[in-house]
Amino acid sequence: MAASEDTGVVAVSSIFLSDIYDVRPISAYIKSNKALSQLYNPADSTYTPNYKVSPIVLTSVVLDPVTHKENPAGLSSVIWSYQYKSDYGTITSTNSSDDWYVSGTKGENLNIKNNFGIDSDGATFTALISYTDSDKNTTATNSVSVKIDLRNLVKTSIILNTYSPTGYNIVNSMPSSISFNGDLYINGTIDSTTKRKNDWFRQDTSVLTTDNPLYDSRVGLGWAKILPSYTGAKPNSDYGSIVTTSARMQILPEDIINVESYRLITVATEGEHKNSPQHGFFTAYNFDSALTISIETPDGSVFKNGNGSKHLKGVVYNLVGEVDSNGTLYNYNWYVYKSDGTLDTTFGGSGKKSGKTILVDSSEIDDNSQLTLEVTDG
């Protein structure tokens, strides 16, 4: 999606069609006291970090729909669920001696004090959050999820461990920037000698053709190379340069209009894993953006058996409330990212549909299509 250097974009929203809400969602997210990644080293049977020694705590947060500030007083309740290996269910324990338990006056904290099994890839945790608007005497809900990855440093393997030491959310101007990291592990240990390329990309709907100078076939259409001339994100090495250091990138708040996604490809240029690309994916959120967008679906959000069509409507809010109710103040452009992560250049005939309200047919999406709405100055 277009970032701050792309002229005119004032707000962005992105949502999977299977998760479109029928009512305006509250702004909510999950924050963590640790990076959402754990490593297991079979050489000495150790975990980093070790949740038995220092538990990871996930905390659900809601923002006031008008001020966009944290509002714990409006939190009514939180129900936590999980998907781990082939199992899934609800976490209800409040017993601090259990491996997983909830705490807080509204159940807003999920405490994880045991390590994941080495036969898993981690676990996904979801918070179903209820929020009461005292001014309107209404209660809204939102469901937000996080994935904690477990990476097993199996011998003779190459693994790119990606994480954010600062978190993925900017709220109330904190933090002042977001950092994304990618550490390359070879044969069970972090590598600092193998020559490699660390190439970064950002989601950008303006990359519609393969002759675009920002296009890279490894990530496909809808993604742009982050070159030295780009000022919104600052990698520690230039695109295409050969280094022996881990990948680091600092992202400034102005580069994140509501939500922005980034990708990292690290490729060893020598040794036994030469030319074996390793991929990382990141998404950052800026809850301090001047405008936010809700995607509404009056026809519902689920397509069945490849049939039917749905109307989608973009509703823009500022700190006071809804703006541009008649759709004349801004331009509304809709895009679809296919299940392989690339931009669908056939959507709407030219790669996009325009208008505050659009109609999407089931034939225009696949099982995991991501719908992105960009709002630009009219």
Image (cartoon, rainbow, N blue to C red):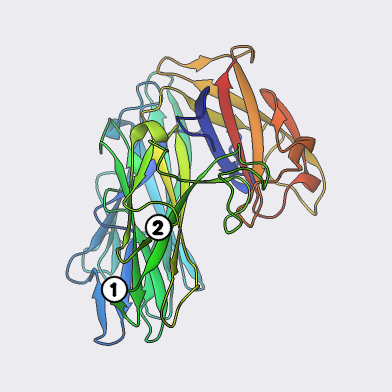
Q: Going 47% across and 73% down the picture, which residue do you hit?
A: 85
Q: Amino acid at mark 2?
A: Ser
Picture quadrant of residue 63: top left
Which of the numbered marks, if any, corresponds to residue 169?
Answer: none
Question: Residue 378 versus residue 124: which sits nearer the camera?
Answer: 378
Which structural element holds mark 1?
Answer: loop
- Position of residue 71 measured from the top left corner of the image (x, y, whole percent): 30, 31
- Spatial CA span between label 1 and label 2: 15 Å
Please tell me whether mark 2 sits on a helix, a strand or a loop.
Answer: loop
Front label number (1 vs 2): 2
Q: Quadrant of the N terminus?
A: top right
Which residue extends farthest front? 241
Q: Residues within 10 Å of mark 1 (few under 14, many from 20)?
A: few
Residue denoted by label 2: 241
| Vertical position of residue 138 compared to residue 109: above or below | above
* Residue 275 image point, x, y percent: 50, 72
Q: Quadrant of residue 272?
A: bottom left
- Regarding residue 23, the answer to whether it shows in the image is no
Residue occupying image coordinates x 45% and y 32%: 257
Sequence-wise, the earlier of marks 1 and 2 is 1
Residue at position x 31%, y 66% in the image:
244
Q: Is residue 259 visible?
A: yes
Q: Is residue 161 above or below residue 144?
A: below
The circle on residue 193 is: 1
Q: Position of residue 38 (x, y in %)?
A: 32, 68
Q: Amino acid at mark 1?
A: Thr
Q: 295 left or right of 347?
A: left
